[in-house]
Image: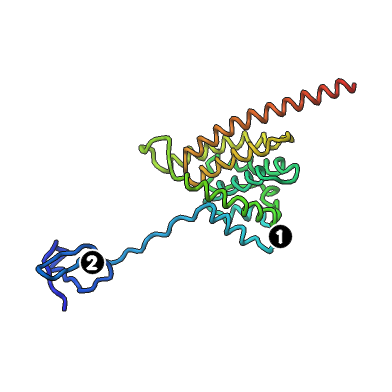
Amino acid sequence: MPVDVPCIPQGRGIFTVPKRPPETLASLKLGSRSMELTRPAVPAADPPERTSDRLTRMAAALEGRTEGPTIAELAEDLGRLAYGMLLLICALGCALPGPPGTGAVLGAPLIVLSFGMLRGHHHPILPAFIGRRRLPPEGVRRTLLRAAPMLARLEVYLRPRTLLGEECAAEERAVVQERLTGAAVLVLGLLLSLPTPFTNLPLGVSIAILALGLLERDAWATALGMVAGSFAAALTIGLTGGWLLAGAAVVHLLG
């Protein structure tokens, strides 16, 4: 039989406490009896999907497919994560071992994505000739499966952080981060399009770090990606100049 226990007023009347509530808020002892205050259970919010889990799910969807997705289809499926995920997929395609010319092929989408971020577009707007470009399903699936475990280890260190101070609104911080990422990716994408050997790995890793910072809203990762991108850009420019000088020397000797 329920017992009426005086407590903090809730509207009007006395708050009646059942004997066996579904969820305990606090316990009040009256003599030898223990009474419990209760409140309705509030369903917990589902945690956001991790980037590594998203890559694994995308790889599973590509299994057994004979026709790969186009870049426009990927952008549409990814929604608000399109910029970060497309940058990450292109960067991993450059950083991981692949056929020659991969950097030149993926450099154009990176440049287009960077322009969209610099202009403040919420979703990528791709030219038709890039949006229709179809990706090989098995190659994309292998890249995603190889990248997911590495990203799962990195996600332990990634979380939303800012370098601008908490007085700035979250939306303003996101806009600044997207613009800085777009500017860095524009430079790195242009360098990636050059046919310079041994530069795909450092450039791809730098863009991957920038993409992770964008996905996780981690300004520290964005800053790290810009530092790594500076070193990668310097290395690419130095190697390109060295190859040009070497080619000029060979032509001079042969001539």
Count residues near mark 1 (Cα–Cα under 10 Å), then give few for <14, some for 14-19, many for 20+: few
Residue 189, image x, y percentages: 64, 37
Q: Locate the N terminus and report the quarter of the image it occupies.
A: bottom left
* Position in image of residue 127 (x %, y %): 66, 46
Decide if residue 251 is on the left or right side of residue 180.
right
Q: Residue furthest right?
A: 255
Q: Is residue 199 left or right of residue 16?
A: right
Identify the secondary structure beneath mark 2.
Answer: strand
* Residue at the left extreme, as displayed: 31
* Mark 2, residue position: 38
Vertical relation: 208 (above or below) 31: above
Q: Earlier in the sequence, mark 2 or mark 1?
A: 2
CA gap, disc 2 and disc 1: 56 Å
Picture quadrant of residue 34? bottom left
In this rendering, the answer to whether 70 lies above or below 239 is below
Q: Which residue lies most toward the bottom here? A: 1
**Few, some or many residues within 10 Å of mark 2 (<14, 14–19, 20+):** some
In the visual, does 133 lie left or right of 3? right
Give the numbered dot on residue 221: none
Residue 188, quarter of the rendered image: top right
Q: Amino acid at mark 1?
A: Glu
Reply above or below: 57 against 158.
below
Image quarter in which the C terminus is found: top right
Amino acid of disc 2: Thr
